[in-house]
Image (tube, helix red, strand yellow):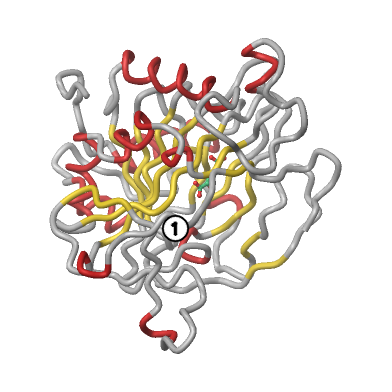
Amino acid sequence: MSTAATETTATTAATAATAATAATGTAHAAPATAHTGLAAAYAENGFAVLEGALSPAEVSGLLAEAVRICRGERGAVEGAAPGAFEGSDEEVIRRFLCVHYPHKLSALMRDTMRHPAVTAALTAVIGPNVKAMQSMLFIKAEGRPGQAWHQDEMFIPSRDRSLTAAWIALDDATVENGCLWVLPGSHRRGVIYPNREHDDARYDCTVQSYGFPYRESDAVPVEMRAGSVLLFNGYLLHKSLPNTGRHGYRRALVNHYMSAESLLPWAPPAPGEAMAQADFRDVVMVAGEDPYRYKGYADIRRPRVRPDRDGGCDR
Ligand SMILES: O=C(O)CCC(=O)C(=O)O
């Protein structure tokens, strides 16, 4: 994997705040200076953009691999509709909103979890020992929904608030095609807000957060070039809107990480085990040492499609 083309910069809120200023006339995030370090800006805002972290060749390789995954050439994808793998590449990939756990199907996706530029940034914001537990491959063709306001720690709990997403843009992500929107600084209170079902057709079937002290007008779109990576904290409120482009995709690969020191209570404890000891071991080490290596590793979650609104929300 090449690092030569990698210019990892802590552009962070400057990019998003500039975008927000352009979109709404108001800067919603504290402006970053050229001297703002990645970790400091991330701590302040809850997110940071690594410009050009992946080379164009790496992005092309991932896009080609995405086609193989959606064609079923890398193995079974649970929940794929009958006939989903048949047709032209274009017909096939647009049937998928999102495939969960592509790293379980593809060595390239697994290797990308450990991309050197991303790993360097992760160790700066998390610490020296980092593990991954989830990947998601979004295709999101035109007309497909976004995901309502949420915090990732509501779904993947860490014990030390270290959950961090690396959202890798595989197409230029724009407001039109459904880039992420964030509420800068919303991670800082360390509160998990309540969530509920919704019937808003702009969003997929995932529950939405509510009751938080921020307004829609505080939200900032994070437009990014393909190959750039958005790191964001698991307590940061974020959402995405539908792809309203006339044609095309908003593809992204999203990997989730936390400190290797944190237990991962992502499933009920085993019989006889205390809740406080629950530790989901279907993880991939990406940096440093695993203090729980003695427990061994598991292969539990299966690659699957994410339900969207085609045919309603089947909950
Ligand atoms: O990419 C999207 O549209 C949603 C992704 C997201 O919210 C997440 O990765 O937590």
- Which residue is rendered at x = 38% and y = 85% of the image? 276
The amino acid sitting under disc 1 is: Leu
Front residue of 178/217: it is: 178
Q: Position of residue 256 (x, y in %)?
A: 39, 50
Q: How many marks?
A: 1
Badge 1 element: loop
Q: For residue 304, what is the image quadrant?
A: top right
* Up-down relation of residue 185 to residue 271 (above or below): above
The CB of the residue at mark 1 lies under 8 Å from ligand 1:
no
Front residue of 227/308: it is: 308
Residue of label 1? 236
Quarter of the image with the C terminus is bottom right
Taking the image as shown, residue 258 lies to the left or right of residue 266, namely: left
- Which residue is rendered at x = 21% and y = 44% of the image? 121
* Up-down relation of residue 224 to residue 124 (above or below): above
Q: Position of residue 50 (x, y in %)?
A: 28, 35
Q: Residues within 10 Å of mark 1 (few under 14, many from 20)?
A: many
Q: Position of residue 118 (x, y in %)?
A: 25, 39
Q: Position of residue 48 (x, y in %)?
A: 31, 44
Q: Residue furthest right?
A: 311
* Up-down relation of residue 134 to residue 116 (above or below): below
Front residue of 3/263: it is: 263
- Which residue is rendered at x = 35% and y = 49% of the image? 47
Front residue of 285/186: it is: 285
- Which residue is rendered at x = 19% and y = 62% of the image? 290
Taking the image as shown, residue 234 lies to the left or right of residue 213, namely: left
